Image (tube, rainbow, N blue to C red):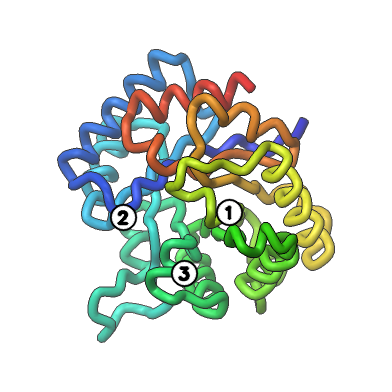
Amino acid sequence: MSDRTLLLAGNWKMNHDHLEAISTVQKLAWALEDAKLDESQCEVVVIPPFTDIRSVQTLIQGDKLWLRYGAQDVSRHAPGAHTGEIAASFLSRLGCTYVVVGHSERRADNHETNDLVAAKIKAALAQEITPILCIGESLEQRQEKTHVDFTLNQLDESLAGFDAAALEGIVIAYEPVWAIGTGETATAADAAEMATAIRARLDEKYGSPLAASTRILYGGSVKTDNVAEILGSDDVDGALVGGASLSGPDFAALCKAAVAK
């Protein structure tokens, strides 16, 4: 049994305006209290759209909720003439603990490369925001049995130029592209295989302390009825949850199932 804290992060993607965000966080907090869950058992994070973050911050800090929150992306640039970009320093001022980088939807829709992902990680770390680095293969790569090599190459290139000290606390999310928003889910064995391979690569490149402390999540159609099985491996330390996190009570039920595994 690992002593790494279970992490359950709800990525809302482009869902919920700021009023819906307030309602969802309130209902999530109430449902977690009803389920008798607290921060000693798991870390629960909401990752709303940029336009919701201030409202979420005000609610969580004002009501002293034990939830944490983060952002779905960050700019590689410092503040300046970069229309539409959001600087890491802005997220820091809003109290964001986490930021998602390299999500497969951004890699596909915005043509983000591993080099760009590495630059975003650097920007986040400079503001003491923890990156959640997303990596994972396509269905074609899995069918060709190149999925492990492909995913580890994403890991290597996205973390290029960092040493173990810089990466302390970073979170890795394995998200097979073919399982995101499709209803398809990798098997527990698939998730375990990749998490174990990722941890071994971290050990090889950065040493045992970082490998042992880094939390590795699974993301891709995670639901209440499959989360316990997915988290069955000692190398899987939580989940990056999509649709199932959009409802406060549903996300709380998933968290309860995860803790009870």
For the residues labelled 3 and 2, the Cα–Cα distance comes to 25 Å
Query: Looking at the image, do the residues carrying marks 3 and 1 touch, with CB atoms under 8 Å apart?
Result: no
Residue marked by disc 1: 176
Amino acid residing under circle 2: Leu
**Residue ID at (73%, 40%):** 189
Which residue matches tag 2?
A: 94
Q: Amino acid at mark 3?
A: Arg
Of the numbered discs 3 and 2, the one sitting upstream in the chain is: 2
Describe the element under mark 2 as helix, strand or loop.
Answer: loop
Q: Are marks 2 and 1 in contact (CB under 8 Å)?
A: no
Identify the residue shown where x is 42% and y is 66%: 106
Q: What residue appears at the point 65 percent right and 29 percent down from the top-left corner?
A: 229
- Amino acid at pointer 1: Pro
Residue 107: which numbered mark, if any? 3
* Residue 185 % position (x, y): 56, 41
Percent position of residue 224, x then y? 49, 26
Q: Nearer the viewer, residue 30 or 155?
A: 155
Q: Nearer the viewer, residue 131 or 243?
A: 243
Sequence-wise, the earlier of marks 2 and 1 is: 2
80 shown above or below 199 = below
